[in-house]
Image: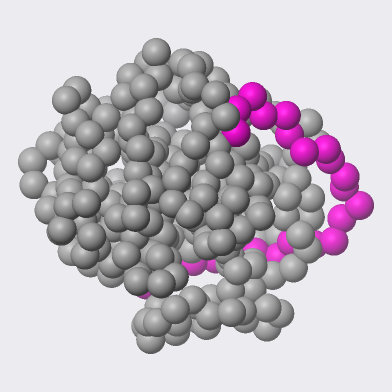
Amino acid sequence: MHRRIALIRITPSLLATAASVMSAALLSAQSPAKAAVAARFTSLPGANVITAIATDYAFDMPSSVPAGLTTIRFSNKGKELHHIYLVKVEKGKKPNDVVAYFKAGGPPPKWMKPVGGPNAPAPGEETVFTSNLEAGDYIALCVIPSPGGPPHVMKGMIKSITVTPSPRKAAAPVADVTLTLSDYDLAFSKPLAPGRHVIAVRNAGKQPHEFFMAQLMPGKSPMDMAKFAENPVGAPPGKPMGGITDIVPGDVVYLQVDVPKGEFAFMCFTPDMKDGKPHLAHGMIKQISVK
C-alpha cells in the first residue's frame, strides 16, 4: 500500500477525506450548465419516499417521518459535495451534542449509532437510498469538509429528525445484486452490468463500513482517487456517483443506481477501529469493470 495513503486519518465518514477535497476540482472541471437530475428510480413497494435537498450548507428535508421502509431521494444542489450521514441517537440528544463531539474529537460516542444514508453524488446529481427506519430520534449531518475548511456540520449542516411509530409494514426490497462489505473487502454477488439496479448492501464485517463509488476517467485507477484525496492537484480522476454512508455490522440497506459502461472505483474510507487508518489502506478498495 502506498505509504501516503496508509497515513490518511479521517472523521467518521465515507468521504471526509476524498470527496471533501474533490469538490473544488470537480467544479472547475464541470461545464457551467449542470446536468439535469434524472428521475430514474423505481418506487420500491411499501416504501415511504422523502426528498432531501442539500445546498451549501443546509438540508431541506422533513423533520418527521413515519417508521418503516423509507427511501431518501437525495439531490445535491450545492456547489460542493454533500451527503447524509444519518445517526440514531439516544433520547434527549440534540444537534448541539453532535457538534460538541466534533469539536472535542475522539472516537464516536456510544449514544450515536450510524444507520446509513445516501453518499455524495456530484453537484447536480442524486443518490437514492432505502432502509428500514425504527422509531426514535435521529440526526442527519454532513461531515464532508469544504476544501481547506471544517466539516459542513460545523457550518450548520445538521438537522434533527423524529421517526414516529407507525403500523406500516413492508417486505424487504427485491434487489438484483448484493454488495457485501466485510473486513476488508467489497464483493458483488455477480458482475455489475450496465443499466438500473437495486443493490442490497450488507455489512458482514465486525466494524462499521460504507462505500463510495466513482466513475473513473480513462487511464485512472481507484488508488488515483485515493491519492487525489491527499493532494488534489490537477483534474479529478473520477466522477462521484454516491454510495452509502456508514452502517453497522449486520445491517442491510439498499441503493438504486443507473450505471453506464466504464471503469468504476469502489472504496471504504471509514477509519479502522484498531489503527485509525481508512479501510482502503487495509485493502478495501477495488476497480470494477462494467461492460
Q: Is residue 155 magenta?
A: yes
Tell me the residue at 44%/79% (across/down): 107
Q: Residue most toward the left?
A: 234
Tell me the residue at 16%/25% (across/down): 219
Q: How many marks?
A: 0
Q: For residue 269, what is the image quadrant? A: bottom left
Q: For residue 69, what is the image quadrant? A: top right
Placement of 233 over or under 34, stated as above or below: below
Q: For residue 7, what is the image quadrant? A: bottom left
Q: Is residue 225 visible?
A: yes
Locate residue 234 relative to residue 133 in the image: left or right: left
Image position, residue 46 (x, y; %): 81, 36
What is the magenta range?
152-178
Q: Is residue 122 visible?
A: no
Placement of 78 over or under 90, stated as above or below: above
Image position, residue 97 (x, y; %): 52, 83
Tell me the residue at 44%/84% (across/down): 100
Of residues 213 and 144, the one drawn nearer to the viewer in this rendering: 213
Q: Residue most toward the right?
A: 167
Of residues 179 and 85, the one drawn nearer to the viewer in this rendering: 179
Image position, residue 207 (x, y; %): 52, 62
Locate residue 20 relative to residue 189 in the image: left or right: left
Image quarter (top left, top right, bottom left or bottom right) of the C terminus: top left
Of residues 191 and 11, the one drawn nearer to the viewer in this rendering: 191
Placement of 40 over or under 148, stated as above or below: above
Locate residue 242 relative to residue 132 in the image: left or right: left
Structure colour scheme: one colour
Image position, residue 33 (x, y; %): 27, 28
Tell me the residue at 38%/86% (across/down): 104
Q: Residue most toward the top?
A: 291
